[in-house]
Every structure is written in C-alpha cells, then in structure tokens.
Amino acid sequence: MKREYHKWWSPRLQRDMELLVYGHAGARVLVFPTRFARFYEYEDLRILDQIRDKIEDGHLQLFCVDSIDAESLYCSWAEPVWRIQRHIQYEEYILNEVFPLMDSVNDNPCTISHGCSLGAFHAANIALRHPHLFSKLCAFSGRFDLTLEVEYFGDLFSGFYNDDVYFHTPSHFLPSLVCEQKLAALRNMDIVMVVGREDPFLNNNLHMSTLLTDKGIGHTLHQWDDRAHQGHYWRKMARMYL
C-alpha cells in the first residue's frame, strides 16, 4: 500500500502541519482524528487494516489530517471567542491547503468526509457547511453540538455564543438553512451516522437525524449495542460503512 508523509508551514495556522496519504487512487477520504489525536491515529488504531484491500485495489485513497483541538475547541485557557476563531482557521487550512493537495494527486470526483468521536464533528461540520465539496459523510460516534453538557462532557465554549459558534454547530444551523443550492447538494450526499445506544451523544444523533429528515435530506443512522465508542468498534464500522 502506498503511504506518503507530507509536512508544510501553514500560513493560515502559522505553524507546521502534517498529514499522511494512504493509497494511490479511488474516492478521496478526508479523515479527521479524535480529540487531541494525531494524523497517524487511523494507522495506530488499526482501522486502516480493515480497509487495506479497498485502498490497495484503488477504491479509496485516505488523507489523514492532523488536529489542533488543543489550540482551539479544547484550549481551556483561551477565551471562547478565540477558541472558535482558531477552529475557523483550521477549516480554512483544510479548504485552502489540504484540498489543493488532494486535487493535485487525485482528480476523483468523489470526496468522503470521515471521522470518529470529535473527528466526526469535524467531518460533519465541514461537509454540511460545504456540501458541494463532498459526496459522502461518514460520522462514527459523533457529537454535533459542542455546547451540550452531557455526562462529563461540558460546553466547549463555556456559555459563550455568537454567530461563529452558531454556524459551526450543525444541529443549530441546519433548521434555518434555506439556500436551495446547499440543500440540493446535501440531498445528493450519502450521509451515514453510526452511534452506540449507550453513547452519551445518542440523543444528539437522533436529533440530527430528525433535522435531516425535516429538510428532506436522506441519510442513515445506525445504532450499535453498548457505547461503541472506541477503536474496536470503529474498525468494524469502517469496514461496513466507509
């Protein structure tokens, strides 16, 4: 299996950013890591092994990006307004630096946004905000509202709320989405959500499913037994749904 390492100075983030590319052809899969995890997490969790044949046969090419969650959403020492601004800079990095790399090595028209746990938030947020860029969304064990307080998970913005938080919270901006062009793109997207029945954000997933249905956006929501929120489950999910 072809494996390529990339690193460059990001002008949008003002720091070095790294990523790994697996495969040589096929649908392009933009993979976001879990909270605080790195660009090599997919390999470390052995999720890669479950889809190795699809990669080697040229059906999928993975672009596993790094995270800056410790500088943005989970940067507890920074003011909330800066946390969301840093997150926005991260999205700009993905759109304006990672996408050009993807375009330069693979012109396949199918791009899949994918992630597990907080990576599922990143995957869903960027795909639902920019649906014209994606053909499919695969969100495993996702949280789609970072302002929720569930179990030991707190509001990542500490009660702060503005338009930036609103427009980067899928379960908040979807109900008011009226742009027919975006809605048409969303209705053409293959959306797959998978969550455990004991996952603390099961209700958030159910709510997202309702919102998508209300907008006429086709999707599937698979509920697995137990919490299903670790690599053992994500390996199986990747094999079945990616």
Image (spheres, rainbow, N blue to C red):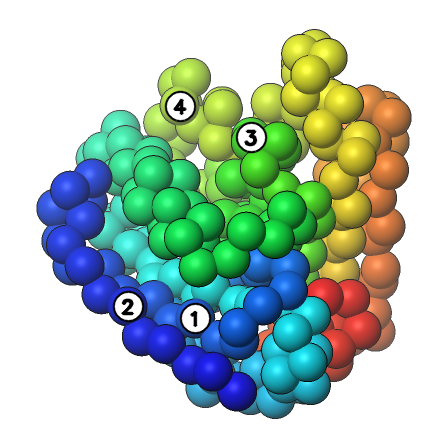
Q: Residue at x 77, y 53 (%)?
A: 192
User: Whole-percent x and y of residue 20?
Assistant: 38, 72
Q: Mark 4 points at which residue?
A: 164
Give the CA separation, mark 1 to mark 2: 8 Å
The earlier-in-sequence mark between 1 and 2 is: 2
The answer to whether residue 14 is left or right of residue 225 is left
Dot 4 falls on a residue whose secondary structure is helix
The earlier-in-sequence mark between 1 and 4 is: 1
Q: Name the residue under label 1.
A: 21
Q: Is residue 213 above or below residue 124?
A: above
Q: Which of marks 2 and 4 is in front?
A: 2
Number of the label disc, if any, that sits on residue 6:
2
Given the image, on which type of amino acid does mark 4 rest? Asp
The quadrant of the picture occupied by the C terminus is: bottom right
Q: Nearer the viewer, mark 1 or mark 4?
A: 1
User: Whole-percent x and y of residue 141?
Assistant: 65, 61
